[in-house]
Amino acid sequence: MARIVILGAGIGGMPMAYEMKALARPGDTITVISEAPKFHFVPSNPWVAVDWRQRKDIEVDIAPALKRKGIESIIQRAKRVHPDANQIEMEDGSRVDYDYLVIATGPKLAFEEIEGLGPHGGHTHSVCHVSHAEASKLAWDEFVKAPGPIVVGAVQGASCFGPAYEFAMIMDTDLRRRKIRDKVPMTFVTSEPYIGHLGLGGVGDSKGMLESAFRQRHIKWICNAKTTKVEAGQMFVTEHNDQGQPIREHVLPFQHSMMLPAFKGVDAVFGIEGLTNPRGFITIDEHQRNPKFRNIFSVGVCVAIPPVEATPIPCGTPKTGYMIESMVTATAHNIRELLDGREPTHHATWNTVCLADFGDTGAAFVALPQIPPRNVSWFSEGKWVHLAKVAFEKYFMRKMEKGTSEPIYEKLIMDFIGITKLKAKLTGK
Ligand code: FAD
Ligand code: DCQ
């Protein structure tokens, strides 16, 4: 019987555990290792940061939820993976053996790459972790009493841009509701070559629509931006041209700031020859499997994906929930095939389907495949997206509580829109 271990219990790890349990043989053991006792629905962090959600609304107790499905859990940080020994060294010195390992640790947030960045001793806030969002909310409470300029965006090397746009729009909505928007000059600073690039080379008319949304909301922007340093109340930004040459230095004063950092791999895997790339992301083949350590798979933000295209300032490719769930389903099937003595055959669909909230409205985008030219490249704004995102949050939270193993993306394809139908409509077939 096989011991299958899943490292990380986030958007990738939890569905991985449920789907693996449903596909494993009766005697196989599934164990989830998580440094935190709770699962968090990361996409709702921006709402926590303006007090539209509380932490408790977006968390699920991992151990009891998994136990109900016969899945074991170890609530402790993994210190180091030892792939040659098929073991994970834990923080307390104990070792966990595995036959198959799925790495789903998400990112390490590389705040330290820019002086003064981030909530740990720096001057900018973050929505990447719920605890950061909670700290940001406390600062927001003070900010709205004495409002001033806001700088929001994503730094060089970032790969996750959607939440920066979301948070800019959400703050704008919250300030308008408080009738203090007129006291808050807002600037969006991004490493993307243009507004709406999103690390994807744009999706449909995302450039035009997001520029328009920013104009309507009086949010100024600086693209091709390198954030060089942050001090208390001011950010130093170098703007570049399309050739990547510096064209202007900005010193942006702020009273409140949230900047998405670059991501890298977590310490437990960083620098393991053959397992990770130089940034610490897990290298995988088309079956989510590491080419050197053939019993290690990986899903989620921690996998290595090349940028969609070269940009003047480095921009990574986002790994969104839909893509992550497809990695999960492919991995569960591939491990089952190995258990049956067969070679893996399942591929994840490298597609982007995403709901981005703008507070009162929102934008949905579909990019199939992720790298242009595409069969479907669709971007649409509307109030329905805000409502759909709230509905999706509830749906996902319920699935994590109940441990439903049905692949989320397959259900979504069938229930929500039918990607195939959409494709047929757009291609006229
Ligand atoms: P995570 O959800 O971060 O989970 C990783 C888990 O592993 C964490 O719980 C962590 O504590 C644990 N872990 C890490 N290291 C260790 C260790 N050594 N030992 C034990 N446990 C460990 N995508 C969308 O599709 N739609 C959205 O609206 C959306 N919004 C986003 C908003 C924000 C603010 C961010 C940052 C991302 C968003 N994403 C969104 C992108 C993506 O869906 C999320 O980043 C998602 O959380 C990634 O899932 P994951 O499982 O890879 O990582
Ligand atoms: O897992 C998801 C996730 O959480 C990480 C999201 O963040 C909120 C998502 O947006 C998934 C799968 C999604 C995508 C949800 C898409 C719902 C379908 C909406 C219809 C799109 C218009 C064509």
Image: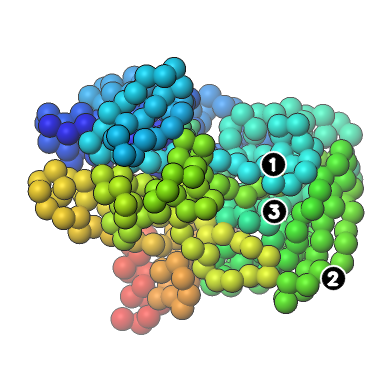
- The residue beneath circle 3 is 155
* Residue 222 vertical placement versus 357 (above, below): below
Residue 373 is situated, as x and y percent measured from the top left of the image, at 46, 78
**Residue 112, label in figure:** 1
Residue 196 is situated, as x and y percent measured from the top left of the image, at 63, 65
Q: What's the residue type where badge 1 is placed?
A: Glu
- Mark 1 vs mark 2, CA separation in Å: 25 Å
x 65%, y 32%: residue? 132
Residue 318 is situated, as x and y percent measured from the top left of the image, at 52, 56
**Residue 247, label in figure:** 2
Q: What's the residue type where badge 2 is placed?
A: Ile
x 78%, y 41%: residue? 116
Instruction: Please name whichever residue, 130 or 310, is drawn nearer the observer in this view of the structure.
Output: 310
x 31%, y 68%: residue? 420
**Residue 361, label in figure:** none
Q: In which quarter of the image is residue 98?
A: top left
Whichever of callouts 1 and 2 sits on the residue coming sooner in the sequence is 1
Q: Can residue 428 be seen in this view?
A: yes
Q: Is mark 3 on a helix, strand or loop?
A: loop
Q: Are marks 1 and 2 in contact (CB under 8 Å)?
A: no
Left or right, residue 166 beside residue 75: right
Of the two numbered discs 1 and 3 in the rendering, the one whose residue sits closer to the viewer:
1
- Check disc 2: other Cα within 10 Å, few if <14, some if 14-19, many if 20+: few
